[in-house]
Amino acid sequence: MTYDGLDGRGLERLTGAPFVEIHASLPSTLDVAHELGARGAPSGALVLADEQTAGRGRHGRAWHSPAGAGLWLAVLLRPARAPVGGALAIRAGLAAVDAIAHAVPEVGPRLRWPNDLIAAGRKAGGILCEARWSGERLGWAAVGVGINVRGPVPVELADRAIALQDLALGLTRVVLLAALAPRIAALADRPPELEDGEREQFGAVCWVEGEGARDAATVDREGALLVRTGAGLLDRRVFPF
């Protein structure tokens, strides 16, 4: 099995992942990442699918992920210390924004709290973090990422979704994967709470929708969004991990 011409070994060399599993079609890469976690796979193990038939986002929403159109992946993480609140979701979002900016700087990606990747004012991707626990002890975490690379975006979603190739014609899935996978894998080594530099990074790339929308102040150390209301109050929005 190959992925855009690269087999598992080639993808391991490209991404630095200790193990890569490739599938032509899966319900969800997250499901396989959890299976690998239960079997003792190492942190940084990567699951790739050319197509997802039941990709999922927050609150059980479906994620459109047709064959060949995007980068559909999950990375298994084994943090030494469990992230608190939504810290991992924020970090994964920042990693994805940084990867896109590295691969195609002209896109100017942004992050809509907590896990939507925005380009040219439309959604280009999403992130979903899931964990498996044994009592109060974290067994592992899985970070699922879906990014529209090639498109085409369905007509009914074209007003709010975009493929990155619409903005950067030469972008390939492999180029983006090489930038993204190591950045996600490195999150296993981060401390439980967000650091000041990460909070500042979020503030620099945060995207708030709509004219006259309330200004996002920042995120706190647990990844909760702090929003300044029109009345000058600070609204704290929580996204649990």
Image: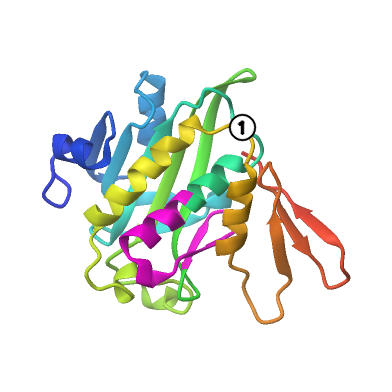
User: Residue drawn at (43%, 44%), measured in percent from left and top?
Assistant: 144
Q: Secondary structure at mark 1?
A: loop
Residue 7 lies, in percent from the top left, at 13, 40
Q: Is residue 10 left or right of residue 124?
A: left
Does any portion of residue 203 appear in the rendered image? yes
Report the residue marked by disc 1. 192
Of the pair 158 and 189, the residue shown nearer to us:
189
Q: Is residue 39 left or right of residue 129?
A: left
5 over 148 or under it: above or below: above
Residue 171 lies, in percent from the top left, at 25, 65
User: Residue drawn at (24%, 55%), measured in percent from left and top?
Assistant: 175
Q: Quadrant of the N terminus?
A: top left
Q: Residues within 10 Å of mark 1 (few under 14, many from 20)?
A: some
Residue 134 lies, in percent from the top left, at 57, 18
Magenta-tinted stretch = 95-118
Q: Look at the image and say whether residue 113 sits in the magenta stretch.
A: yes
Residue 179 lies, in percent from the top left, at 32, 50
Q: How is the image coloured?
A: rainbow
User: Residue drawn at (50%, 27%), measured in percent from left and top?
Assistant: 79
